[in-house]
Amino acid sequence: MIRDITIGQYYPAKSILHRLDPRVKVVSTLLFLISLFLFRSIPGYIIATAFLVMVVRLSKVPFGYIVKGLKPIIMILMLTVLFQLFLTRGGDTLVHWWIFTITEEGLVNAVYMAIRLIYLIIGSSLMTFTTTPNELTDAIEKLLGPLNKIHIPVHEIAMTMSIALRFIPILLEETDKIMKAQIARGADFESGNMLQRAKAMIPILVPLFVSAFRHANDLAMAMEARCYHGGEGRTKMKPLRYVSRDRVAYAIVILYVAAVFVIGRYVPFHIWIF
């Protein structure tokens, strides 16, 4: 399970998505996530699916690697689907047993919410797969630059977010090493009920916290040794500049959002087919 968590990891490849300006990828990801909640019809999901498939193919990230990142959220996905399935009322009753009732509206909401969550994870993961932590920091700092005028520490916020993303794969690797060391010493993390499994995680959490604080202290000392004093007056080796492919990417994303909003909300399904 630990090795299946891919969020925050960068997948090196030679694709057009990797070459895009990181600001384009941040803005486009936000627009895609927002677009998932702008429609509630089959045509909207068809358009969103086609757009996501196109982006995945352009990224040249293996589909199996992307799907692997969905495994850790299966439990959350199942709970969300069950809540939508049994707690939503409306439409005809499909199944009624004891205190459980499944309605037509509940079934539709459960399916739509499951698809939205899966697309949300895939869409946000593609941004980290195709963008290095340094590029992500520069993009966030550039996009939030106007907030400097009201004395908001934009550079520090961007740096904190970048470090947090960078530490995710490091901590996952540390967790995997600690678990293997504990298993070699006879620890059992699989047998027993849920409470016993939670107690068995204590020998992992304590050294993991110690390792995290050690990494944070080493990072702080390294930044101080290099006379790091924030973003004021600092220059960049690779300043961000928009080129033609970035403008084309913006146009494609805007057209997608407009299409999914108009067709997904206002065009009936039977009209859309015929």
Image (cartoon, rainbow, N blue to C red):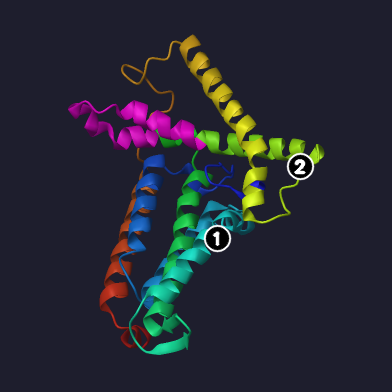
Q: Which residue is mark 1?
A: 75
Q: Is residue 103 left or right of residue 255?
A: right
Whichever of labels 1 and 2 marks the residue nearer the N terminus, that label is 1
Q: Position of residue 1 (x, y in %)?
A: 65, 51
Whether residue 121 is visible to the viewer of this picture, yes or no, is yes
**For numbered disc 1, what is the local secondary structure?**
helix
Q: Position of residue 260 (x, y in %)?
A: 33, 68
Mark 2 closeness class: few <14, some 14–19, many ≥20 residues within 10 Å? some
Q: Is residue 80 above or below residue 267?
A: above
Quadrant in which the C terminus appears: bottom left
Q: Is residue 145 left or right of residue 74?
A: left
Check if mark 1's residue and mark 2's residue have beta carbons within 8 Å.
Answer: no
Amino acid at dot 2 = Ala
Q: Is residue 113 left or right of residue 61?
A: left
Q: Residue at x 43, y 23 (%)?
A: 237
Number of labels in the image equals: 2
Spatial CA span between label 1 and label 2: 24 Å
Find out whether residue 105 is within the magenta segment. no
Q: Which residue is mark 2?
A: 187
Q: Is residue 46 above or below residue 17?
A: below
User: Which stretch is magenta?
Assistant: 138-165
Q: Nearer the viewer, mark 1 or mark 2?
A: 2
Q: Residue at x 40, y 23 (%)?
A: 236
Q: Position of residue 164 (x, y in %)?
A: 47, 34
Mark 1 closeness class: few <14, some 14–19, many ≥20 residues within 10 Å? few
Q: 52 or 82, which is in the foreground?
A: 82
Report the magenta stretch's main SS: helix
